[in-house]
Image (tube, rainbow, N blue to C red):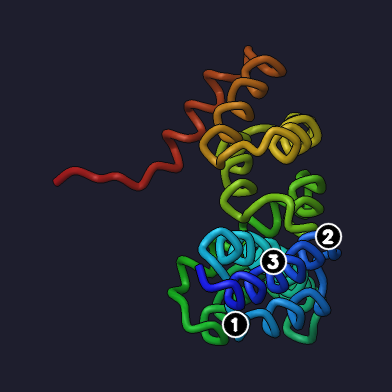
């Protein structure tokens, strides 16, 4: 490699090292944007990609705050829905129109926000720090979907810390969460299975 180019790569790698140690906030976003014009080798580019992933996770965490505020505003605003289901419907319609996604997608997003707000605080904090991705959070939500808030919160408190510490993939996180659900509430397995079956939307004609 050309010595001058190697020197440039080295300077960029040093800046990336600084970025990797920064808290995930708007300032880090600016630093990463400034790096986009810098020369870098493949290994440094992978590191930049990883830091951008943290920024994306942080952004998604704060997007959830806005979605939760939408739910609160619809529920407590001037237009009073007749039921929680109608409140969710109205909020999902607003978000679907604003973000150009299908209504069903907006409903799923709001349901996740509700679950995280009610019983998955560690998941949100890890997402906000950029320690885990949204896919990790969804993996825990799937594993605890038909659990009580108490079981969900216990799984969230245990599994999220381990997922961050051990660098688990979403699949590994999901398996650990399912295993812990069975350990915490073995008698509820049949009830959870019945609940999942009742929510299934598969039809045969």
Determine the image quadrant of residue 67. bottom right
Residue 185 got which mark?
none
For the question of whether residue 152 can be seen, the reply is no
Please tell me which residue is depicted at 56% across the width and 42% down the height of the picture: 170
Is disc 2 surrounded by few (<14), some (14 to 19) or many (20+) residues within 10 Å? few
Q: Which mark is residue 13?
A: 3
Give the camera-side residue of 126 and 70: 126
Query: Quick one: label 1 or label 2, which is nearer the N terminus?
Result: 2
Pick out the residue farthest to the left: 205
118, above or below 150, in the image: below
In the structure shown, which secondary structural element does the residue marked by tag 1 occupy? helix
35 up-or-down from 86: above or below:
below
Q: Residue at x 77, y 51 (%)?
A: 126
Q: Earlier in the sequence, mark 1 or mark 3?
A: 3
Front one among 38 and 191: 38
CA separation in Å, label 3 and label 2: 13 Å
Q: Secondary structure at mark 2?
A: helix
Q: Residue at x 84, y 65 (%)?
A: 22
The x, y position of residue 110, in whole percent, is 62, 63
Q: CA distance from mark 1 to mark 3?
A: 43 Å
Disc number lying in front (1 or 3): 3
Instruction: Tell me: 133 left or right of 106.
Output: right
User: Based on the displayed image, in which of its 4 quarters is residue 15 positioned?
Assistant: bottom right
For this rendering, which residue is in front, 168 or 191?
168
* Residue at image mark 1: 94
- Numbered badge on residue 21: 2
Q: Nearer the viewer, mark 1 or mark 2?
A: 2
Return the disc, 3 or 2, that comes first in the chain's sequence. 3
How dense is the environment of label 3, judged by Cα within 10 Å: few (below 14), some, or many (20 and up)?
many
Report whether residue 17 is seen. yes
* Residue 172 appears left or right of 21: left
Q: Position of residue 35 (x, y in %)?
A: 67, 79
């Amino acid at each position: 490699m050309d010595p001058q180019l190697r020197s440039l790569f080295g300077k960029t790698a040093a800046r990336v090292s600084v970025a990797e140690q920064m808290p995930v906030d708007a300032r880090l976003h600016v630093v990463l944007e400034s790096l986009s014009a810098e020369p870098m080798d493949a290994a440094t580019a992978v590191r930049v990609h990883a830091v951008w992933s943290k920024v994306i996770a942080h952004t998604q965490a704060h997007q959830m705050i806005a979605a939760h505020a939408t739910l609160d505003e619809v529920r407590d605003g001037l237009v009073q829905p007749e039921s929680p289901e109608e409140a969710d419907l109205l909020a999902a319609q607003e978000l679907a129109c604003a973000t150009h996604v299908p209504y069903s997608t907006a409903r799923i997003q709001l349901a996740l926000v509700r679950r995280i707000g009610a019983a998955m605080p560690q998941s949100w904090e890890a997402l906000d720090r950029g320690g885990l991705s949204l896919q990790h959070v969804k993996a825990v939500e799937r594993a605890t979907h038909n659990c009580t808030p108490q079981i969900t919160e216990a799984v969230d408190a245990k599994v999220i810390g381990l997922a961050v510490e051990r660098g688990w993939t979403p699949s590994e996180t999901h398996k650990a969460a399912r295993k812990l659900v069975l350990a915490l509430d073995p008698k509820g397995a049949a009830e959870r299975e019945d609940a999942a079956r009742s929510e299934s939307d598969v039809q045969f004609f």
